[in-house]
Image (tube, rainbow, N blue to C red):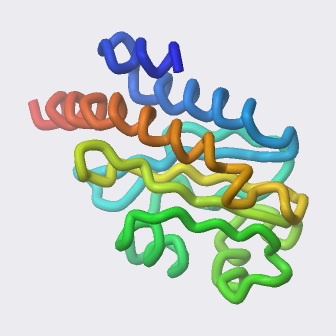
Amino acid sequence: FNALSQALAGSMELEEIADRFLTSARASLDESVSGAVYVQDDARGGYRRVSEQRARVGMLTLERYTATDLPAPIRTRVIDHRGSLIVADASLSDAWPSLRASLVDGDAVGSLAALPLVAHDRLVGIALFASDRAGTLTADKVQLTALSSSFAAAPLRPALSLRDAHRRA
């Protein structure tokens, strides 16, 4: 939370904010969890990866996605409804087939969580976590990470706005 407080003060770049968030989030989760942060990219449309920390498996394969290219369960639950998508056991999930094809090592993923990064009622990105172990990412186990995602989203929004302003200038 201290790193996110620094970011709120404007002392960190976009990638640093995402890296610090992933480091703290992964520290509260199982060691098998990989994580990635995708931010909304208004200049090019869609979402682009700004940070990724891999333990073993399971991140989205592309660096950039349009909202329509994202797997349907993520697009519907996280983008459209701004809710969390938690797949505690991939082998038992109806949503899994459409997600598996979009992941690196998708066949090895046991559980997945996609969390919206929302600041001031604006979706600024997606935090994605995956593990090769079923039951590793459950609603209870990602509760602290979901809470900290709102703290991460707050400094991401002005960092994105600043970067967009520099592009336009």
Judged left or right of residue 63, residue 26 is right
The residue drawn where x is 85% and y is 80% is: 91
Quarter of the view holding residue 167? top left
In the image, residue 123 lies at what x, y percent?
Answer: 32, 54
The residue drawn where x is 18% and y is 28% is: 166
Residue furthest to the bottom in view is 94
Quarter of the view holding residue 100? bottom right
Judged left or right of residue 139, residue 162 is left
Vertical order, 71 against 29 (above or below)? below
The residue drawn where x is 21% and y is 37% is: 164
The residue drawn where x is 53% and y is 21% is: 1
In the image, residue 28 lies at what x, y percent?
Answer: 73, 34
Vertical order, 51 against 64 (above or below)? above
Q: In which quarter of the image is the C terminus?
A: top left
In the image, residue 114 lies at what x, y percent?
Answer: 58, 59
In the image, residue 54 lies at what x, y percent?
Answer: 76, 42
